[in-house]
Structure formats: structure tokens, C-alpha cells
Amino acid sequence: MASDARDGSIAVALENVGRTYQLAKPVHAVEDVSLTLGEGSFTAVMGPSGSGKSTLMNLIGCLDTPTEGRIEIGGRSVETLSDAQRARLRGTEIGFVFQTFNLMPRLTAAENVSLPMVFHDAVDQDRRERARTLLERVGLGDRLDHAPSELSGGQRQRVALARALVNDPTLVLADEPTGNLDTDTEAEIMDLLVELNDEGTTLLVVTHERTVAEYADHVVHLLDGRLEDVEHLGEARDVSVGEVIEGDGAGEIGELDGTGESS
């Protein structure tokens, strides 16, 4: 991970976050989760099926809204943003990579990659050049005009990764990004994510594979919607369980400094 990304800044902060779905009876998908992710951190989220992994990612990515608690992205409280502001935040500062790729089948690889640039006043030529640069970076410079159906699963995931990077996001969220890939292609995708993190991008990867989680510096373990533990695989401790600070700072989210002590 890039050392200059560890300056104590917080990329994501959750305080007592919960998400309840009102079905036949209330379903508590996420309960009372407090967590901070430092800028430039690389975190994996693990847990059994139904533990709330994807729900947590959707909350952090502003694809869903909490029913309890508070979420801050880059210092901004998500719940205070309008729908349009949340959409812009998703489109300009957060990149998404999904297990099922979510590519538009009738668009070429380059068109899929440039699609999120709708939030920028870029002309078509600039968008295509940006898409070409990113597709070259992920090894698909010769596949710009190929449709998703003409690409392998690994190539489609590379297109999806390039699309996630097109707006130069500060935070990239990946939900089972290697779930449909063979072992060799999984390693290639994870190496690209590590390279991205080395450049300072904050990463959060949801996975059920321990081999994937071990690429990260931290592993957040969920069970039944609750945070069980944060496992530190790297030396830095820029991810921590949030704590409510007592006294004058009550209600703020605690963080760990570089020594692992509360600050």
C-alpha cells in the first residue's frame, strides 16, 4: 500500500449503522456496525452467506441508505445529501466492480468503460481516449471495439475494472470480483487491484475466498449482520472498529493512529 496514503485521513466512517428490511417480519441485514477505513487502506469483508457483506458494501457505496446510524464518505455525511448529490458522489468518487460484471451487452468495451463519464463535461474524443488508456492498462488495448459477448469472463472483469477507474475514484468497492473467474485470472485481477491500492486508492473487497482476502491488509469479519472482528494482516492499522469518544467529543467516531492507539 502506498505509504503516502496513510496520513491519518479517514475515507469511510460508519457509526452504529443498521439496515432493516420490512418484509413479512423485520430483517436486520446489518446491525450496529461502527468502522473506520483510512485513506489508502485495503480491506476485505468476509462472512458466511447472508451475513450482510453485500448490504454493507451497498451502504458504503450509497446504493442503499441505512435505517439507523451515520455514514461519512470523505468527511461528508451521506444522509444529509440529496438523491442527486448521492448519485453524483457515486458517479465521481466511488468505483464499483461486481461479480456479474454488469456490462451493457450492446456497447463495446470502450463504450462501457466511458459510460460513467456522463458526470463530466468531456467530449466524445476525450472519453474514448480515457477508455483506451484504461483498457490498455488492464491489458485490453486491442479489444476496444469488442462487445462483452466477444470477451472471456476474465476480459469482461477487466473491462468492469477499467470502467470503475474511469472517473479516477478515491474509493473502489468490489463485490466478489473474482467469483466467476478461474484461479489464474483471479490472481491477475487481484494483482491489478493491489497495483491500484499501491497508488493510493482506498479498496473494499467483499469476498468469501480466504485467498482473495489475504491480498488485503485488513479483514472485516461479519456474522448475522454484526461486526465480529477486524483482522490486521499488514503492519498498518488504518482500519478499526469505531468507538464513540467519551466526554466533549461524544458522538464522534474514534480512529486508530499509526501506533494502533485511539486518537
Image: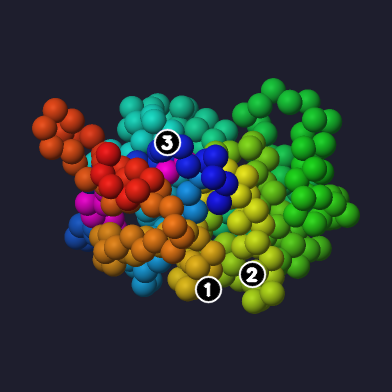
Residue at x 38% of width, y 55% of height: 55
Residue 217 colored in magenta in the image: no
Q: Is 30 within the magenta?
A: yes
Magenta residues: mostly which secondary structure?
A: strand
- SS label for mark 2: helix
- For label 1, the SS is helix
Q: Disc 2 marks which residue?
A: 186
* Residue with the most extreme front position: 259
Question: Which mark is in front, 2 or 3?
Answer: 3
Magenta residue span: 29-39
Amino acid found under the numbered disc labelled 2: Glu
Q: CA distance from mark 1 to mark 3?
A: 28 Å
- Residue 239 is labelled as none
**Which residue was labeled with disc 1?**
211
Which residue is at 22% across, 45% downward? 243
| Residue 208, horizontal then vertical, whole percent | 45, 71
